[in-house]
Image (spheres, helix red, strand yellow):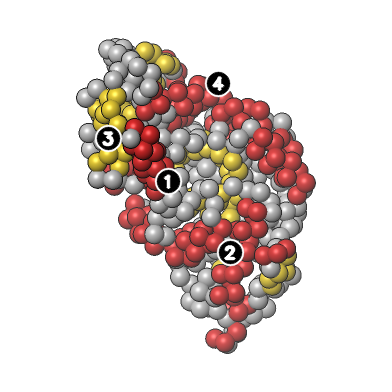
């Protein structure tokens, strides 16, 4: 009888965990991953370049960093690897089946992916399917050869009807009839290249073939979709369901209402970069720490109960100040992050995102500038088991400080940021790290004696039981589900 009950409990455990993890394509449940954006704008250039002062990041350069990357990061986001060479950063690639780009050769890419996989780090492709570059005129495109997934040659019929190529007299397809152009765009216009018609079945098949080929031939593990403001979310869902990536992250650079709408359009089969949390983090720079508090003026996805779908970040290749008209210059008074005036901004923001729910994405120049401090914060996050759906148990803030208590799978942390934060050590917690006045952050940790992974250690009596079809564990005064979440 005991064996039968244990067997039933095991089946319920497996079913419960499987159901939670299989709920959405490309959205891992309770994910403890930490991500690195392994490039910045023009970082394929030589190290003497003004744009590459934090180190060049061609494939051969990142290969030298794999040991350090493997030791700290679960996910690495690469720049667009489609070519051919001469496409620069790669956001207007011309031939998607070519993996020889300004970042390096296809062989170099393959060697880098293999090295990262050996260290159990997954790799994300930057997928640009909203638009693409041309061959030798506005409306001519290279043929893409995706092996068993098909061969595709797009034409002007696959460009949205309101693309500027049809209204610009310099264009080779200027004034084309309605029968020689695609449907009206389902999203915002992108005028740097030709916008593709995702209503077209041919374009859909091309995108599905491309994404499957990236995973199964080039050996990527997941996707970062570029410029998803440019097409309806139903198509992103379609491509994810065809390819089934480990993770999908959508770059929807917009306000919270539009991001919520996008998640609904995708039927929650993707995560999104949490731009609103990034802008709330500006409180660290301007001294308004209340902007980080969910109960005050914070506007990130966590405020709306969508932390599971949030990829949090401080800067990226677009927002980072590149010494041009681009970038919002939020954290950096100059392009040199290593100056003392910027260190406290970057590290306070890093302490915040690395101790909070969502999947945190570390920016390569930040990591290169403050590798010791950021690696230490990552280690604390992993020790406590902070994950994408971690509960923020308590938070408080004032004009000059912010504090939060966060529950992980294996413990709790208290993170405090701001030069005027309390330095009093809470009872039951040990000091994990103190950034001092230069970093202006402190993290305390309390390991969780009631964690699910310790239920058989005998220190506290535990009881397994089934309620509403779910296996739950009562330990002390708390009840946990199979993934370690406190239920009641």
Please name the residue shown 36% across and 41% down the image: 8
Between the residue at mark 4 and the residue at mark 1, the CA separation in whole angstroms equals: 37 Å
Mark found first going from the N terminus, 3 or 4: 4
Mark found first going from the N terminus, 4 or 1: 1
Position of residue 339 relative to residue 472, above or below, is above
Between 75 and 188, the one lying in front of the other is 75
Q: Which mark is residue 372?
A: 4
Please name the residue shown 28% across and 28% down the image: 463
Residues tagged 3 and 1 counted as in contact (Cβ below 8 A): no
Please name the residue shown 69% across and 54% down the image: 217
The quarter of the picture where the C terminus appears is top left
In front: mark 4 or mark 2?
2
User: In the rendered image, which residue does mark 1 sit on?
Assistant: 18
Residue 15, x across and y down, in percent: 39, 46
Mark 3 is surrounded, within 10 Å at the Cα level, by few (under 14), some (14 to 19) or many (20 or more) other residues, namely few
Residue 12, x across and y down, in percent: 36, 42
Q: Which mark is residue 465?
A: 3
Between the residue at mark 2 and the residue at mark 1, the CA separation in whole angstroms equals: 26 Å
Mark 2 is surrounded, within 10 Å at the Cα level, by few (under 14), some (14 to 19) or many (20 or more) other residues, namely many
> For numbered disc 3, what is the local secondary structure?
strand
Visible residue check, residue 352: no
Between the residue at mark 3 and the residue at mark 4, the CA separation in whole angstroms equals: 44 Å
Between the residue at mark 3 and the residue at mark 1, the CA separation in whole angstroms equals: 18 Å
> For numbered disc 1, what is the local secondary structure?
helix
In front: mark 3 or mark 2?
3
Mark found first going from the N terminus, 4 or 2: 2
Please name the residue shown 42% across and 53% down the image: 24
Between the residue at mark 4 and the residue at mark 2, the CA separation in whole angstroms equals: 41 Å
Q: Quadrant of residue 252?
A: bottom left
Q: Which mark is residue 208?
A: 2
């Amino acid at each position: 009888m005991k064996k039968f009950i244990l067997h039933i409990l095991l089946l319920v455990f497996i079913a419960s965990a499987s159901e939670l993890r299989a709920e959405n394509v490309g959205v891992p449940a309770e994910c403890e991953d930490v991500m690195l954006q392994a490039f910045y704008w023009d970082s394929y250039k030589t190290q003497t370049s003004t744009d590459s002062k934090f180190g060049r990041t061609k494939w051969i350069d990142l290969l030298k960093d794999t040991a350090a990357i493997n030791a700290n990061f679960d996910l690495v986001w690469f720049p667009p690897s489609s070519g051919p060479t001469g496409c620069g950063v790669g956001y207007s690639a011309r031939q998607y089946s070519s993996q020889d780009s300004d970042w390096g050769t296809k062989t170099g890419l393959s060697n880098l992916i293999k090295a990262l996989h050996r260290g159990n780090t997954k790799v994300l492709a930057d997928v640009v399917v909203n638009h693409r570059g041309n061959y030798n005129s506005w409306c001519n495109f290279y043929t893409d050869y995706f092996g068993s997934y098909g061969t595709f040659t797009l034409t002007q019929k696959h460009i949205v009807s309101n693309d500027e190529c049809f209204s610009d007299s310099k264009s080779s397809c200027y004034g084309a009839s309605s029968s020689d152009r695609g449907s009206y765009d389902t999203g915002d216009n992108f005028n740097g290249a030709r916008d593709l018609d995702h209503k077209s079945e041919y374009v859909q098949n091309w995108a599905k073939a491309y994404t499957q080929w990236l995973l199964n031939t080039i050996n990527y593990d997941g996707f970062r979709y570029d410029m998803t403001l440019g097409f309806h979310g139903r198509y992103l869902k379609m491509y994810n369901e065809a390819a089934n990536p480990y993770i999908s992250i959508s770059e929807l650079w917009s306000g919270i209402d539009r991001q919520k709408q996008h998640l609904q359009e995708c039927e929650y089969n993707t995560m999104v970069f949490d731009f609103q949390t990034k802008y709330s983090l500006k409180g660290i720079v301007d001294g308004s720490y209340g902007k980080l508090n969910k109960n005050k003026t914070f506007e990130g996805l966590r405020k709306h109960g969508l932390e599971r779908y949030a990829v949090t970040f401080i800067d990226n290749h677009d927002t980072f100040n590149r010494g041009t008209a681009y970038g919002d210059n939020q954290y950096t008074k100059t392009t040199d992050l290593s100056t003392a005036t910027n260190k406290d901004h970057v590290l306070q923001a890093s302490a915040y995102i690395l101790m909070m729910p969502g999947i945190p994405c570390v920016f390569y120049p930040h990591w290169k500038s403050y590798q010791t401090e950021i690696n230490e914060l990552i280690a604390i996050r992993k020790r406590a088991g902070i994950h994408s759906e971690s509960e923020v148990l308590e938070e408080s803030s004032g004009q000059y400080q912010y504090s939060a208590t966060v529950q992980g799978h294996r413990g709790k942390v208290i993170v405090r940021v701001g030069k005027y934060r309390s330095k009093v050590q809470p009872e039951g917690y040990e000091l994990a790290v103190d950034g001092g006045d230069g970093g202006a952050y402190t993290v305390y940790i309390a390991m969780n004696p009631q964690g699910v992974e310790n239920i058989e250690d005998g220190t506290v009596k535990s009881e397994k039981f089934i309620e509403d079809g779910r296996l739950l564990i009562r330990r002390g005064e708390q009840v946990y589900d199979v993934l370690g979440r406190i239920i009641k």
